Amino acid sequence: MEGQYACRKDIKEIVKLRTLQQQELHITDFKISIEELVSSDTKFLKEHLNKDFFMQIYKIEKQIVAMCGFQIVKYLPSCDGTTGTVACLCSVYTVPEHRRQGLQKKIILTCLNAINAKNIQKIELSATNPDAIALYKGLGFDHSKTFMQNY
């Protein structure tokens, strides 16, 4: 087993895993076709991978079995002393047959260390899965009561 940052040659396999993840999360409410998702994810990764979006992956026998990405977003600096730069963890996924082996914790910790090395003070993520929420809380994340969305 090896952990590493994804590169362009990993894009096709990352898109495959992300499609599986999205299918698990949104079984009944897909608003676009699988083909559109694959196309938009591929385009995004080709444009952003290792620029403002980073993906930590774990491979077993040369196959990606787990991944965690983070996007760096820059806002205006705030009067509270924060820089305005935020890292958003996303696309946290492990294929079902490799879950409950500690892979996500290792990947997330690697991402958190990389984020800290970039002097980013705020890290965000979104989660609905109770097991994932427990993992994130164990890593020091708290639920925010101020986050809102508009669709």
Image (cartoon, grey):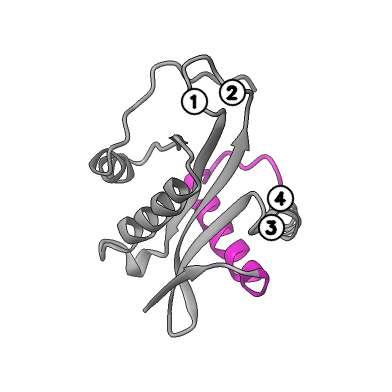
Q: Is residue 49 above or below residue 10?
A: above
What span is in magenta? 8-32
Structural crowding at the residue carrying mark 1, measured as other residues with C-alpha within 10 Å and reported as few (<14), some (14–19) or many (≥20): few
Residue type highlighted by circle 3: Leu
Q: Secondary structure of the magenta portion, mostly?
A: helix
- Mark 2 or 1 closer to N-term? 2
**In the structure shown, which secondary structural element does the residue marked by tag 4 occupy?**
loop
Q: For the N terminus, which image quadrant?
A: bottom left
Left or right position of 17 against 93? right
Residue position marked by numbered label 3 in the rendering: 45
Residue at 31% across / 39% down in the picture?
Answer: 133
**In the structure shown, which secondary structural element does the residue marked by tag 1 occupy?**
loop
Please report contact status of discs 4 and 2: CB closer than 8 Å, yes or no: no
Structural crowding at the residue carrying mark 3, measured as other residues with C-alpha within 10 Å and reported as few (<14), some (14–19) or many (≥20): many
- Mark 4 or 2 closer to N-term? 4
**Residue 82 - label:** 1
Q: Nearer the viewer, mark 4 or mark 2?
A: 2
Would residue 12 be counted in the magenta stretch?
A: yes
**In the structure shown, which secondary structural element does the residue marked by tag 2 occupy?**
loop
Residue at 40% across / 49% down in the picture?
Answer: 112
Residue position marked by numbered label 2 in the rendering: 77
Residue 118 in percent (x, y) is at 50, 47
**Residue 24 - label:** none
